[in-house]
């Protein structure tokens, strides 16, 4: 029996969002799983060893940074341990401005392994971008956009092996107990709303939450932990007690949604970050790199085990056991959430040929912030497959 499915059956997900929530946010936070591992909403960047004791040098003036225990810190810097570096980022988060509108531009992707005779390589498929904004008050408007992005090789090495395989532009993969095909073709923005995606009378609400209520949340980490991070089964929205690592994953998921994709005030975001850092099973790991190549300071939950069997079909290459962890990466200069990533920690099963740190899936913020200017969707991401 697939261990992941056993956990999923024993501990059901929280009640699904309403149809209105799904339509309003283009399924930004609630897209169905594209893989066997239970999706806790978000996944992976560069390699960071579990339990690392590395330090990070933070420039007091917000300038350049260095990492590593043997790298001298430049003048005007102070060396911080991994936890202190993360808390310093939280301090930066509470200093960010607010505005009339809040927007989030989120890219997500799922890794798949291609195994042609010419050599195994990884692609990022099921890649989508969602853009959503809302006015702070009712009547200021809101809009929701989405599009598919091209499937593409993950790294330069993968691109070289992709070329060796004949540079295919269509990728057939096993995912979610069935075969799917992803292509190297993007789609145009699609939108919800009658006026180019804009709901002119909207605003003042986000994912069913009143922005006014969000503005009134407490700024004390302990109070926020009681509201959002209680181990109470009822408050965590689960039917039975989960293992500690799974509970930590859920808490990281919840805070990522509140900090990265919800119009919470800067001081509330900072307090949520501090509350998360204090949770059992969540620890600072120093620097990590997100799928868009940006470095930041990170928190990680404990390792989880996933086992794929042949019970639900699929090729033998997709079967076996591997271990993974969830990682949240934050910009050390602004405290903004960069990415939520699922990192491979012990290769095996479908990822037997990958290395620890391989990105299994992710949701990354291209940007998310308050602004006084009505937001517009960004241009296409540059995925050049030549």
Image (cartoon, helix red, strand yellow):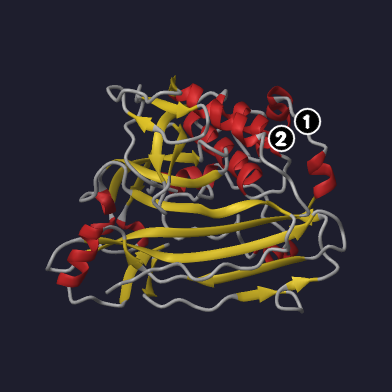
* Res 162 → quadrant: bottom left
Q: CA distance from mark 2 to mark 1?
A: 7 Å
Position of residue 92 relative to residue 194, above or below, is above
Report the front residue among 7 and 158.
158
Q: Which residue is mark 2?
A: 268
Q: Which residue is mark 1?
A: 218
Residue 316 appears in the picture as rendered: no
Asked whether disc 2 touches disc 1, contact meaning CB atoms under 8 Å apart, the reply is yes
Residue at x 45% of width, y 70% of height: 149
In the image, taking residue 213 as reference, residue 169 lies left or right, namely: left
Query: Could you tell me which secondary element the residue under label 2 belongs to?
Result: helix
* Res 267 → quadrant: top right
* Res 94 → quadrant: top right
Position of residue 69 relative to residue 146, above or below, is above
Within 10 Å of disc 2 (Cα), the crowding (few <14, some 14-19, many 20+) is many
In the rendered image, residue 385, in percent from the top left (x then y), is placed at 30, 72
In the image, taking residue 46 as reference, residue 191 lies left or right, namely: right
Residue 29 appears in the picture as rendered: yes
In the rendered image, residue 309, in percent from the top left (x then y), is placed at 32, 53
Residue at x 58% of width, y 43% of height: 256
In the rendered image, residue 230, in percent from the top left (x then y), is placed at 67, 29
Report the front residue among 177 and 381.
381
């Amino acid at each position: 029996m697939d261990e992941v499915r056993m956990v999923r059956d024993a501990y059901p997900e929280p009640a699904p969002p309403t149809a209105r929530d799904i339509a309003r946010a283009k399924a930004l936070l609630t897209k169905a799983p594209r893989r066997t591992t239970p999706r806790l909403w978000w996944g992976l960047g560069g390699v960071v060893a579990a339990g690392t004791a590395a330090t990070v040098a933070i420039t007091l003036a917000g300038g350049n940074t260095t990492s590593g225990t043997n790298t001298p810190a430049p003048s005007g810097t102070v060396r911080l341990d991994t936890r202190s570096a993360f808390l310093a980022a939280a301090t930066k988060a509470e200093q960010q401005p607010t505005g009339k509108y809040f927007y989030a531009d989120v890219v997500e992707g799922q890794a798949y392994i291609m195994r042609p005779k010419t050599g195994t390589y990884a692609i990022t498929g099921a890649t989508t971008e969602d853009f959503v904004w809302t006015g702070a008050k009712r009547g200021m408007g809101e809009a929701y956009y989405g599009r598919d992005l091209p499937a593409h090789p993950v790294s330069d090495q993968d691109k070289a092996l992709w070329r060796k395989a004949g540079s295919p532009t269509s990728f057939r993969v096993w995912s979610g107990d069935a075969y799917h095909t992803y292509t190297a073709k993007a789609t145009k923005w699609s939108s919800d709303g009658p006026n180019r995606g804009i709901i002119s009378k909207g605003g003042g609400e986000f994912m069913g939450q009143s922005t006014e209520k969000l503005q009134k949340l407490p700024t004390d980490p302990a109070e926020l932990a009681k509201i959002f991070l209680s181990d109470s089964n009822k408050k965590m929205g689960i039917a039975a007690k989960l293992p500690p690592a799974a509970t930590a994953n859920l808490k990281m998921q919840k805070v990522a949604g509140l900090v990265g994709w919800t119009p919470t005030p800067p001081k509330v975001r900072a307090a949520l970050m501090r509350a998360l850092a204090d949770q059992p099973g969540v620890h600072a790991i120093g620097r990590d790199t997100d799928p868009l190549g940006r470095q930041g300071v990170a928190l990680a939950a404990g390792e989880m085990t996933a086992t794929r069997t042949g019970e639900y079909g699929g090729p033998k290459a997709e079967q076996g056991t591997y271990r993974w962890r969830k990682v949240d990466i934050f910009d050390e200069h602004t405290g903004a959430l960069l990415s939520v990533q699922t990192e491979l920690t012990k290769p095996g099963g479908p990822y037997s040929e990958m290395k620890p740190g391989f990105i299994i899936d992710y949701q990354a913020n291209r940007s998310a912030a308050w602004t006084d200017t009505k937001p517009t969707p960004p241009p296409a991401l540059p995925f050049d497959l030549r």
